[in-house]
Image (cartoon, rainbow, N blue to C red):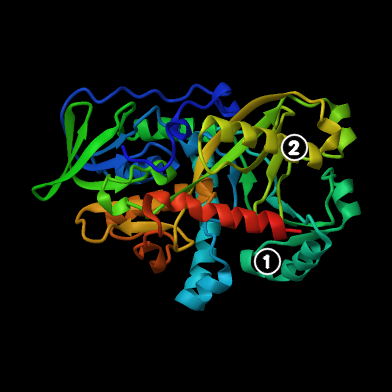
Amino acid sequence: MKRLYEPGAYGPAAPWWAETVTRPDWPSLAEDITVEVAVIGGGFTGLNCALALAGAGVDVAVLDAERPGWGASGRNGGFCCIGGAMAPEGSLRRRYGAAALTEWQTAQGAAIDHVAGLLDTHGIDADRHSEGETVLAHTPRAFRALRAEAAEAAATWGVASEVLTRDDLAAQGLGGPWHGGMTLRRGFALNPAKYHAGLARVATRAGVRGYGRSPVASLDRNGDGWRLGINGHSVRARRVVLATNGYSSEDLPDWLRARTLPVQSSVIVTRPLTGAEAEAAGWTSDQMAYDTRRLLHYFRRLPDGRFLFGMRGGLTARAEEQIAVSRRIRTDFHATFPAWRGVEITHEWSGLVCFLASGHPFAGAVPGCEGLHAALGFHGNGVAMGSYLGHCLGEVLAHGRSGGPMPAFLGQEPRRFPLGRHRRALLRPAYWLAETFDL
């Protein structure tokens, strides 16, 4: 595999979620097989795609390089919420038109509803909680901006928005160094490992063939279809779906080279807080939240009383930088919640968020590669948007239509980032500018 980061970024991780559920453990591919569709990647996107295909009677196999859920689906913060693009809405409106922007906004709501529907329909207990999400202003200027945006946000998403003063936040158990905030009651928090494990069970019952520890070493045209080389065996498929996101290999196929920019995100989780400790920090809510920094912090109290805190990671996966990031996330956590300086941090891990140069996801046919499709680039919102676009792509392959809002611009080929294999260097000045001027 040709990947952008050092091996440490793709090595073992010990997220808290892994201790809460028995993760799926599919067998390795040990023979040659033929299927209608081969899906590469056993995370939220790949499983949703495969489930849609199997539901239509399509013979489908999912292939994962590790155990399914090894990557971002098992390492994320569990925020099922609005999002999926880094490009500002004004930019999307100028590029694609007002109607396309409205369809994109509708798709974001549909993505949340899609995950909620899966949980409800299949009885997946994923520790769902939080009524929407709260954004917290880290400066007075940011709070003024939230006030100005509140009415428009409510109209856009079709739910009430609540502007919260510092006193309001404290009264709702959202204490901290905030100058105010806004709650939009759209979305919810969940345990991503429980959601993933439930989804894998549902897919298996539907007839999806799942293979773990089965890395795709080659991907070549084979007559009117494709041949995938795995563990010395082959999978022949008429169509292939790439659902590897930030964990993609640059050469599978070569079309992927430099089209993604994986970015590290780091997470820590504390031991369960006592009631007195929660009161001391003023944070007693189970609301999922993030702040208004460009390099934002995201956090929430988990159902068992633990506290999760996340932020961006390092530019490399080298040991010395990981040590520096570990020090930095603790510094930021303690600066935000000084009352918890003595609280033990029991878990720490990192994962890869996937960015595209377009600033929005890609979902559709890979140009110039008949029968090859991809869904990737969810910009840190893969729980909802990765699930939804995987489902939509499966519906397109099975029925010729997505079955829900899916803007045409998502099918536009993402351009390559400059600097090729050195493109991580683009992040350094961006991080410096954000940290220097985000005041």
331, 237: nearer the viewer: 331
Mark sitting earlier along the chain (1/2): 1
Q: Does residue 271 appear anywhere in the picture?
A: yes
Q: Where is residue 321 in the image (x, y as percent from the top left)?
A: 57, 36
Measured Cα–Cα span from mark 1 to mark 2: 32 Å
388 sits left or right of 367 in the view = right
Q: Position of residue 280 (x, y in %)?
A: 89, 34
| Res 25 label | none
Name the residue furthest left: 223
Secondary structure beneath dot 1 equals helix
Q: Position of residue 186 (x, y in %)?
A: 64, 54
The amino acid type found where label 1 is placed reads Ala
Q: Which residue is drawn at 72% across and 62% down?
A: 160
Q: Mark 1 points at which residue?
A: 153
Q: Which residue is drawn at 70% across and 57% down?
A: 436
Contact, mark 1 vs mark 2 (Cβ under 8 Å)? no
Query: Is the residue 304 above or below the residue 57 in the image?
Result: above
133 sits left or right of 397 in the view = right
Q: Position of residue 168 (x, y in %)?
A: 88, 53
The amino acid type found where label 2 is placed reads Thr
Q: Mark 2 points at which residue?
A: 331
Query: Is the residue 33 above or below the residue 103 in the image?
Result: above
Quadrant hosting residue 248:
top left
Query: Is the residue 44 above or below the residue 93 in the image?
Result: above
